[in-house]
Image (tube, rainbow, N blue to C red):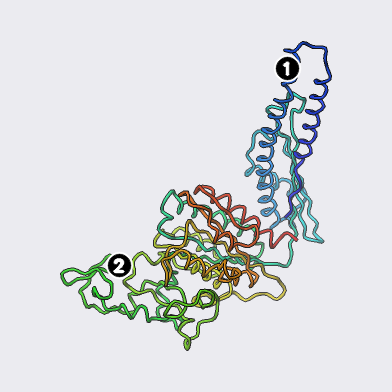
Amino acid sequence: MVGSKTKGAMVMKHISADVRRTWRALLRDRRANVALTFGIAFIPVVALVGAAVDYSRANSTKVALQAALDSTALMLSKEAGSLTQDQMNQKANDYFKAMFTRPEAKNVLITTSYNAATSTLVMNASTNLDTALIRVIGHKSMPLGTSATIRWGTNRLRVALVLDNTGSMKDDGKMDALKKATNDLLDTLKTAAVNKEDVYVSIVPFSRSINVGKANATANWLDWSLFDAKKVVNSANGYSCSWGFCQIGGNWVASGTVLTHDSWSGCVKDRGLATAPGKNAGPDQTVVAPDIDKIETLFPATPPNVSADCPPAAVMGLTTDWDKMKQLVTDMTPNGNTNQPIGLVWGWMSLVGGGPFTVPAKDTNYAYDQVIILMSDGLNTEDRWYTSQSDIDVRMYDKDNGGVGTCKNVKDANVAIYAIHVNTGGDPESKLLKNCASPDKFYYITKSDQMTPVFKQIGSEIAKLRIAK
């Protein structure tokens, strides 16, 4: 899908030329008195200011025009091959007018063209924007135009949504905004799929740990050593105890109670050695398959005495069940500290398989684009080993050692990373997420409601990865 250059830029050149000619003419004209000359000379100044204002309005309208046309083309492309030209024109106008609501844009014209031989849909949109200030030099309107081209190719799309579910997401309406933005993104991806297998999506909510679901308690890829070390409920194992009873998960049990694996929360910690691994190598940075003979490759079950450690919503592997995905999004609840590295590596694993994930077989007649969208609202605070931000960050991206870490491993595997830092608390831009993202795929936003347009932009762009050739 490719947008054409706006006509507004050409109009702006003409306006600037008109202003310059008017200014030169005034400077040469000596017939009027000083006051009159000054008054007339002020017109070009107003025109220049007005040009900037009107051009800003035009640019905003152009962005909305392109977004509505992109969305219309995506929806129309699914049925273009079965429509007559009149039907296609009617649907195109209906779709477009439902999304493009700019009353200042006049005489909107939409044209469509479909080439069945190449499975290519071309759409064009044009309009005229009434000017507010540059009317004084004769420009009453500015023409705007853009285009969208879709050609169905041989690529399919697989997307992992890695979403921050930490406790701070409850602030400033961030969790509600994330849910809306994610559901809108899912709608965009669903629309982009002509065939069921065209687009698969996985969802990985994360905090300090990852919820893989209590149903996996008997899986052979789990390491129970951390859990078993704390299975006796007493003060020595870190439980809050008083008068012969200890608190666990909001309940009080008798001190000395021995917990079984059935009481496991469903969450796992970072993979790796029992002691802190070296900063530049470890199973927590890769998708190496679990091996029961190598404990460092297994996933450590979270100990029962760790509070605020488990996201309530469990991960979901690649699927085309859009309703089920939306239900998971609805179930997301903010809880726990921030560990972006574990979210990223689990997002990667959801695309390739491992642990609780199985992936749909790939059709050899198609190429596949793989994408991770990593959204977080803050800085890393705690992982399995560290409470130091810098020590956690280096697991993802070691800036002092050539950028090695999980981010590099993911991108070396031909998986694109979109990273979004949502910062409503005045913190600096996350250099970690910016370095982790693929080129030109980092977004920094400071208001919760900015998530929806950013997610929509990303959704449109990754849909283009598959359909724009």
Give percent across and percent down for residue 161.
Answer: 54, 63
- Write the residue at 67% across / 62% down: 194
For disc 2, the marked residue is 249
- In the picture, the disc for residue 53 is none
Q: Amino acid at mark 1?
A: Phe
Q: Residues within 10 Å of mark 1 (few under 14, many from 20)?
A: few
Q: CA distance from mark 1 to mark 2?
A: 78 Å
Give percent across and percent down for residue 349.
Answer: 55, 73
* Callout 1: SS: helix
Task: Describe residue 423's horizontal placement relative to residue 152 as left or right.
Answer: left
Q: Earlier in the sequence, mark 1 or mark 2?
A: 1
- In the picture, the disc for residue 38 is 1
Image: 448 above or below 366: above
Kindly tell me whether residue 246 is visible in this rendering. Answer: yes
Give percent across and percent down for residue 131.
Answer: 70, 30
Image: 126 above or below 405: above
Q: Quadrant of residue 231?
A: bottom left
Kindly tell me whether residue 86 is visible in this rendering. Answer: no
**Direction bottom: furthest residue:** 293
Q: Amino acid at mark 2?
A: Gly
* Callout 2: SS: loop
Q: Nearer the viewer, residue 11 or 285?
A: 285
Q: Nearer the viewer, residue 391 or 267?
A: 391
Quadrant where the N terminus sits is bottom right
Task: Describe residue 366's horizontal placement relative to residue 20 as left or right.
Answer: left
Task: Describe residue 436's horizontal placement relative to residue 328 as left or right.
Answer: right
Q: Nearer the viewer, residue 437 or 265?
A: 437
Count of numbered circles in the view? 2
Image: 392 above or below 377: below
Image: 352 above or below 86: below
Q: Residues within 10 Å of mark 2 (few under 14, many from 20)?
A: few
